[in-house]
Amino acid sequence: MSKSRLIEQKIVDTLEKNYMPYAMSVIVSRAIPEIDGLKPSHRKLLYTMYKMGLLTGGRTKSANVVGQTMKLNPHGDMAIYETMVRLTRGNDALLHPYVDSKGNFGKQYSRDMHFAAPRYTEVKLDKICEELFRDLDKDAVDFVDNYDGTMKEPTLLPITFPNILVSANQGIAVGMASNICSFNLNEVCETAIQFINNENIEVSDYLKAPDFTSGGQLIYKEKDIKEIYNTGRGSFKVRGKYRYDKENNCIEIYEIPYTTTTEAIIDSIIELVKNNKIKDILDVRDETDLDGLKVTIDIRRNTDPDALMNKLYKLTPLEDSFGCNFNLLINGRPKVLGIKGILANWIEFRVDCIKRQTLFDINKKSDRLHLLVGLKKILLDIDKAIRLIRETEEDAMVIPNLMDGFGVDHVQAEFIAEIKLRNLNKEYILDKVSEIDKLEKEIAELKDIYGNDKKIKKIIVKQLGEVSKKYGKPRRTDILHEEHVEEITQEHFIEDYNLKIFLTDHNYLKKIPLTSLRTSPEHKLKDDDSIVQEIETHNKADLLLFSNKQTVYKIRIYEIDDCKASSLGDYLTNLLGLEADERIINIVATDDYKGYMIFAFENGKVAKIDLESYATKTNRKKLANAYSDLSKIIYMQYITEDEELVAFSSLKKVLIFSTSNINPKSTRDSQGVQVLKEKKGSVMTTVKRLSEVSFKDLDYYRTKNIPAVGCYIKDEDKEDGQIKFEL
């Protein structure tokens, strides 16, 4: 029994020998498009159809084309047919389809709409393919052997416009990929013309934006588009288009992004409804028919269709990104190029094509001229030519005798000898010879073109103009500038409703919707606990919570869980992470941070702070130095406009003052201004709103100027049991 031998081999050698040939084959011969905008599978299929006469004739069964293509493309029939499907008019994947089709070829925008079998469908080349094969028979491009050496096929097609930018193309190779979006033919041709005239043009002045067969709206961000144009990499967003049917209270989506399908959109909408993320949708269905794509969404009454669609744009593939990777093969090497790079290489390719076909014409006309020059020589003596032929005994000597007799070469003599007897008349020969001057002129013109790149580029420009005029179509994808697009944030998905927030003495917070509060208004509290503050607001507002440690905590109200009056609510020490001896002493709800915070201190000073001072761009959750700590805080209140307040001192004096006399400050821990003068060691004990006291003579306590010492309280006003003079 022989032992198996282990052969040691370097991993690098293994990769070079086994993996690299496969990788290069996929890159060069399968997945990456070339400068004519075609992959090998596309080119083989279209060339086969061209050779079958399908550019001018009627349609033939797709199965026939697939079978013929196998002579060039050694793949299974279904792989070839799937390649054909995407090139057809029926599939709607290309702005300018190459194949005129009859039958069901599915749809690019549908995942589940399958194409019919090739025996049921019929195809021929579309009219635009004339531009793919123009002058192909004039040696415009190289031809190579097919896989078994029985046929020749073109390495590229001499297409007369930059098809690489007109037809969307995607390919995944080994270690690299390509994803080229489509552009409008008119814009591409105009850009190419302008680039030929001036290479320093601004591409975006002529090539507005990508264009797709599926239409939709492209969200135009100048920076992103220019990056794609300059580097060949980047991404942009495309969103679907819709209309609102007021009569049936439904939304009809009739165009979607090129990168998605109707089924994917419907599935994602159903998932959102199931997960209760969107509550305004009653039903969604695919109503696509012969008139085109349509997805219908039934919505609840009073639903804002535009607001709902904004949510769907954010949460579903109704708005999708297209990632550009302009990777194409240039002379067999993959390169990622910007628009100018692609156009420069395409122009170089077209110049070479035109030079080759011009040289072909020069050679053909020169050969014809050479024959006619020989024919002209027998005009000198037609009878001599006839006599020479008659007197020649051997057939093999006819040509040598003509060569000697008229001083012509072998080719010219062969041409003369092949002339029919009936054509050996002066009229026929003079008619043919008259072509000489015309041919000489044409050859001179062709040689002038062949050696002059400027003239060749003029031909390219002329051809581009003709293609644009003949095949150009209006844009399908609308351009929507980013400033006209509403930015959708998480808050758009938060349900907004009115509610009340309650703060208790033991540091509990209750967030209760008004609907819940109406049904069960009885509050549950801990023993010895009580409600110290109550505010009415809504779910999308911000909540500021001021603590006794000169700190303010900020929280979005929708981040707090709803509760019922019968529950204790959230314990703020846990919710906010408060210190052991820290308590929340005041809460404020706001939408726009307008208004002021009033802080009154034991030393008689009052600060009026802009609420905007607590708004931060970074949405910080905790702010220190929320108010001054130089004196004990005795009163804190949020006001939207100036009002009168009542200050009480430990000397049983009262002062009514207006906050309009206090200048607002933006520094949060400002000490404010002196309102109640300190006298004999007195302090300010409390402050109340004017509506909270019931004095008989308010003017008695009022002051126009601050600071002031206030007035002793009248006996008749002492009956107000809520008045507190001592701490």
Image (spheres, rainbow, N blue to C red):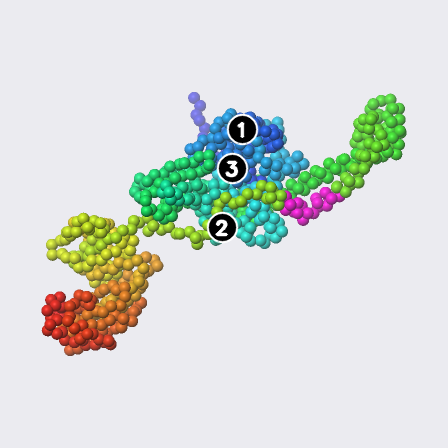
Which residue carries the number 1 mark? Answer: 122
Q: Residue at x 22, y 63 (%)?
A: 549
Label 3's element?
Answer: helix
Which residue carries the number 2 mark? Answer: 225
Image depth: mark 3 or mark 2 in front: 2
Q: Residue at x 23, y 61 (%)?
A: 546
Sequence order check, earlier mark of 1 and 2: 1
Provide residue 618's location: percent of width, then percent of height.
34, 58
Decide: few, some or many residues near mark 3? Use Cα within 10 Å; few <14, some 14-19, many ≥20: many
Q: Residue at x 20, y 61 (%)?
A: 585
Q: Quadrant of the N terminus?
A: top left
Residue 31 got which mark?
Answer: 3
Decide: few, some or many residues near mark 1? Use Cα within 10 Å; few <14, some 14-19, many ≥20: many
- The span picked out in magenta is 444-463
Provide residue 335's location: percent of width, then percent of height.
54, 44
Q: Quadrant of the C terminus?
A: bottom left
How far separated are the C-alphas under marks 1 and 3? 27 Å
The answer to whether one can see residue 716 in this image is yes
Q: Residue at x 16, y 67 (%)?
A: 693
458 falls in the magenta region:
yes
Provide residue 225's location: percent of width, then percent of height.
49, 50
Decide: few, some or many residues near mark 2? Use Cα within 10 Å; few <14, some 14-19, many ≥20: some
Disc 2 residue type (three-letter): Ile
Disc 3 residue type (three-letter): Ala
Q: Which of 308/184 is in front? A: 308
